[in-house]
Amino acid sequence: MAVKALVDSPIQKYLEALHGRVADLREGDLASYIPELTSADPEWFGIAVATVDGHVYQVGDSRQAFTIQSISKPFVYGLALADLGVERVLAKVGVEPSGEAFNSISLEPGTGRPLNPMINAGAIATTCMIAGDSPEQREQRILEMFARYTGHPMVVDERVYASEARTGHRNRALAHLMRNFDVIETDPEPGLDLYFRQCSVLVNCRDLALMGACLANNGVNPVTGVRALPEAQVARVLSVMSSCGMYDYSGGWIYSVGMPAKSGVGGGIVAVLPGQVGIAVFSPLLDARGNSCRGIRVCEEISRDFDLHLFHTSRSTSAAIIRARYDATLVGSQRRRRLAERDLLAQHGNRVRVYDLQGELTIGATESLVHEVLDELAGVEVLILDLARVVNVDQAAARMLADLSRDLTGQGRTVLIPGAANKYAFMRLVAQAWPQSQDLAIFQFSDSDHALEWAEDRLIATLAPPTDPTQETALADNDLCVTLSGEERAGLAAIAQRLEFAAGAPVFRTGEAADALFLIAQGRFEVLLPAPGQPPRRLSTLSPGMYFGELPLASGQPRSADVVARDGGACWRVPFAAIEAGLKIRLLSTIASQLAERLAEQARVQRLLG
């Protein structure tokens, strides 16, 4: 498909104005640790945007060639996933953010496995996995892969390659260190040399925008129609870009820009808005973290000013209405689970799939949505279509959703549509098209979180032996006691008082003085955040064996949320004042460790959902 030049479009005008504003920013320095990069002109500055329907908008030095550098990493990672599969790649390179600089020595203790494929160590290990009978063949496969993304043949800048190879002592040390751990299983030098060459591939800003658009378009080049990456790997590549693509600025980037992205010390940044656009910026002046100063500013402003109509996203495509899609292996409900249940959901949570919808459901958009749902239905037992962010559902769309739900229910699957309670016309239209829906759980839940919890409970019940909901979990078996000795557990039990609560009874309220923590023996307890004039927001639901009210043990602060008994239950109350000093230290250590795990999980979900 030919690229359409829309020079008078709102996007083009916006980009020209944005380029003019940001061109005056002259902060930063040229990369110097690769000597050849210092020859770049600090005034170079280009912006390009490519949409999933093949439109490309560009301004400034968008055709100026520069070396791709670390922006190559997610794309080579995608090639490794396609070559070897997820399990074999994960065995060598993790996916956890390091929070450190690109050249950090972030290797797992004991295994030597790099934390993620976006830092140099992980990228070198990934490059060593590319299939081929010789270094020349592996290089050719990488160049052909890049050509599928950009739509034209790719070449290596030999001068930059020679400069990198001559000065890349830290990378060479990393490669040999990983060889010591068998992360790299053969002589590391050929793979390291290939890594230097992949970083020296020449691109321009327009190339990067198209590469981003390929990822936004489920792996297909929107201009040529050529598949650059198998669809199954696109989400994985975007995930590591979201969490690790901007190195030690990844958290700030996701917070302020909110798009999967990758930067390179050649001055490029590529960002992806899944289902819509690839955005690229080139300016060689870098900040202290190695990211383009102008590039960050441009992406921040586009993110802030972004509006769907600027990109002419058609409301007749699913890209306009699917805000997020995920399964229960990636995002869980606010119901906190113990280890055995978490393991079951990690293994089997793909049986529960959620589509977070937004905007207006018209006939065209819903038809596209239905096709996507059916294409991705293999193995799905519970389908959740969240309408909380949907502002309108027309008659044809309501009928299609009713037909889809009826057909899937007839196949033995369950469809849940939370967020529909205030959409009276939609509810009426579904009831007319499918009267039996009123007798099912399809509209039972007000939000996707409770629907997801219900689906998790149902899935766990089919996989694990049934448990007696009235059975009490012993205090010694509580999550808070996992690191305590027998003597310390006995000491904790000696100061604990068992309390019972009726369904809906409060344990404590926001703002109350905190003088004790609670270990759950029976029943479920909800942590709620009150909101004036609105129903309280559920922060989590806790089960027997868990605990709550622990943070003031360290902070001394008042209660920051309400806790109520959901179905009635019992807890052990442990007064802060009665906890002996040594036991308090042990408890705080356990609390801090488990809190860190929960925060890491919440951060991962936030990166996924944006």
Image: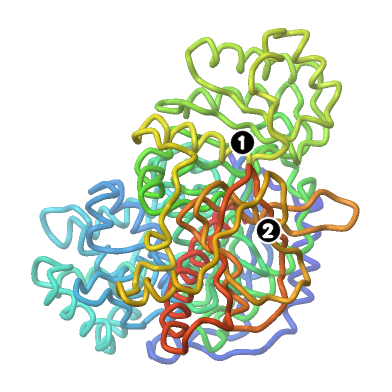
Q: Judge left or right: residue 101 versus residue 383.
A: left
- Disc 2 secondary structure class: strand
Q: Judge left or right: residue 462 versus residue 447.
A: left
The residue drawn where x is 55% and y is 15% is 409
- What amino acid is found at the position of numbered circle 1 in the picture? Ala
Q: Nearer the viewer, residue 207 or 190?
A: 190
- Disc 1 secondary structure class: helix
Q: Nearer the viewer, residue 330 or 497?
A: 497
Report whether residue 544 is seen: yes
Q: Quadrant of the N terminus?
A: top right
In primary-sequence order, the first of circles 1 and 2 is 1
The spot of residue 158 in percent (x, y) is: 30, 75
Q: Judge left or right: residue 200 versus residue 20.
A: left
Q: Quadrant of the C terminus?
A: bottom right
Q: Residues within 10 Å of mark 1 (few under 14, many from 20)?
A: many
The residue drawn where x is 63% and y is 62% is 258
The residue under label 1 is 451
The residue under label 2 is 563
Report whether residue 1 is seen: no
The spot of residue 84 in percent (x, y) is: 23, 48
- What amino acid is found at the position of numbered circle 2 in the picture? Val
Is the residue 461 above or below the residue 601 in the image?
A: above
